[in-house]
């Protein structure tokens, strides 16, 4: 049995959980608070980052390492296309959300509203929060543009790109900060993603002390 050390507010943890469920892999979860990690986390991953994948006494740490590992061991269901050019596009978009979106939106919105609150007990920095929400609009515009031209973010088929984007957006959506009505294509895409069986448990996530937006678990918004 696989143990996944995670937290609901970690987009990389959500990304791995969605992928493992898509690939029909069995796993159990152990929750760790990112702002108050136990020493056991550092023993498993000296970087002190989530998620951490543990199986048969082996440890795989790091978002990209875990995702590549899952893709390699899964023979029946691939989330990367076979053509090199299409694979490159999936990887480009995964990097977009795991790096660019994370820096421009997650750090300014989720870290301010959640990490800062529980880690230091302080209120969010309004300047950072405003910057993050402004940046969010740019990313939603880009998703809107992509979906106007494609069935899924990276092309015709569901892929790691959709998982990465949805993992990040779902946390911001939990906080009620996404103006979906202004981005019809993005809303249609996200509705399709969160209707997948692999998203069922994500929509049940609960961040202690913060209630989800009323529409969060509603498949029809």
Image (cartoon, grey):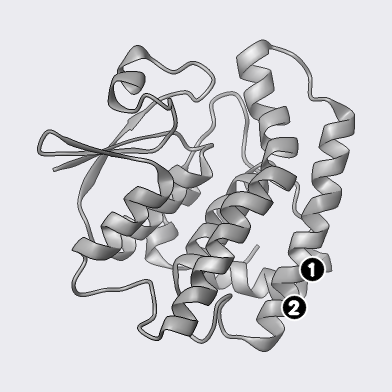
The answer to whether 118 appears left or right of 74 in the picture is: right
Residue 112 position in % (x across, y down): 73, 29
Q: Nearer the viewer, residue 162 or 184?
A: 162
Q: Quadrant of the N terminus?
A: top left
Image-quadrant location for residue 118: top right
Q: Are marks 1 and 2 in contact (CB under 8 Å)?
A: yes
Local crowd size for mark 2, using a 10 Å CA cut-off: few (<14), some (14–19), many (≥20): some
The numbered dot on residue 206 is none
Q: Nearer the viewer, residue 64 or 161?
A: 64
Q: Position of residue 37 (x, y in %)?
A: 44, 18
Q: Which residue is mark 2?
A: 145
State whether residue 216 appears in this view. no
| Location of residue 156 with respect to 205 vertically, above or below | below
Q: In this orientation, does residue 150 appear?
A: yes
- Dot 1: element: helix
Q: Taking 132 as reference, is 102 left or right?
A: left
The residue closer to the viewer here, 94 or 180, is 94
The residue depicted at 88 percent of the width and 39 percent of the height is 130
State the CA–CA distance, disc 1 to disc 2. Answer: 6 Å
């Amino acid at each position: 049995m696989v143990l996944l050390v995670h937290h609901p507010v970690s987009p990389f943890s959500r990304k791995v959980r969605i992928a493992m469920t898509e690939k029909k892999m069995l796993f159990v979860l152990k929750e760790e608070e990112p702002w108050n990690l136990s020493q056991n986390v550092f023993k498993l991953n000296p970087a002190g980052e989530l998620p951490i994948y543990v199986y048969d006494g082996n440890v795989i740490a790091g978002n990209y390492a875990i995702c590549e590992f899952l893709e390699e061991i899964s023979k029946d269901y691939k989330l990367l296309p076979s053509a090199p050019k299409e694979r490159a596009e999936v990887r480009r978009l995964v990097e977009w959300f795991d790096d660019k979106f994370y820096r421009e939106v997650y750090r300014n919105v989720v870290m301010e509203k959640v990490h800062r609150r529980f880690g230091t007990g302080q209120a969010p920095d309004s300047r950072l929060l405003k910057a993050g929400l402004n940046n969010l609009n740019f990313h939603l515009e880009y998703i809107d543009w992509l979906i106007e031209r494609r069935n899924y973010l990276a092309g015709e088929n569901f892929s790691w790109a959709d998982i990465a984007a949805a993992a990040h957006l779902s946390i911001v959506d939990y906080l009620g900060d996404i103006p979906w009505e202004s981005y019809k294509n993005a809303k249609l895409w996200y509705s399709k993603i969160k209707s997948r069986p692999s998203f069922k448990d994500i929509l049940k996530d609960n961040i202690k002390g913060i209630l989800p937006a009323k529409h969060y678990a509603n498949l029809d918004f």
